[in-house]
Image (cartoon, grey):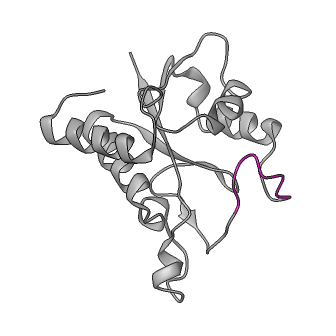
Amino acid sequence: MKRLCIIPCGKKKIWDVQPDAGPVRAEDAYLSPFHQACERYAKTFFDEWVILSAKHGFLRPDDLVSGNYDVTFGTGHPEIMTADELRRQFHEKGFSDIEELVMLGGKKYRSVLNAVIGEHQHISWPLSSYKGIGYMLQALNRAVEEKHEL
């Protein structure tokens, strides 16, 4: 069965440390420790993974991100992609055919993804039982180190 891992982007980006970086691949754009841990986990356990960005939607690792931004789901920011835009993009990128989805994000992503996925799709939230980002980071790092999927 084909699976897709969806990971959150992150506030800290390459342009925060290299303002003149220009457009970069999505997998190189996000620098927060949580994003980096999610990316390592996704690369370890999944053949296909994407980054979910409030501004850009579903980014494949080699999709280009043009520059810095600060847009977060649930904030009412005018640049947040709508559920319709996310659904369209999800379908256009071929993700609507994937039955098993794994989201490595917190609660704020539930309503976003529930509005996007199809009825035939199952989504799991392996970090939902952890009570904070520190515990999530530990779990992700331990899973990668021990080669044991959460």
Horizontal arrangement in the rendering, residue 54 relative to residue 19 (left or right): right
Classify residue 93 by image quadrant. top right
Taking the spot 67% from the left edge, 11% from the top edge, the residue there is 119
x and y, in percent, of residue 108 in the image: 65, 38
Taking the spot 70% from the left edge, 34% from the top edge, the residue there is 112
Farthest residue to the front: give it.
Answer: 131
Nearer to me, 132 or 41: 132
Farthest residue to the bottom: give it.
Answer: 20
50 is higher (above) or lower (below) than 130: below
Taking the spot 40% from the left edge, 37% from the top edge, the residue there is 48
* Bounds of the magenta segment: 71-78
Does the segment drawn in magenta span residue 75? yes
So how many labels did they put on this image? Answer: 0
Classify residue 49 by image quadrant. top left
99 is higher (above) or lower (below) than 34: above
Q: Quadrant of the N terminus?
A: top left
Nearer to me, 85 or 34: 34
x and y, in percent, of residue 24 in the image: 49, 71
x and y, in percent, of residue 144 in the image: 21, 40
Taking the spot 41% from the left edge, 53% from the top edge, the residue there is 34
Task: Give the main secondary structure, helix, strand or loop, of the magenta stretch.
Answer: loop
Horizontal arrangement in the rendering, residue 119 relative to residue 98 (left or right): right
Does the segment drawn in magenta span residue 96? no
x and y, in percent, of residue 96 in the image: 61, 25
Farthest residue to the top: give it.
Answer: 120
61 is higher (above) or lower (below) than 100: below
Q: Quadrant of the C terminus?
A: top left
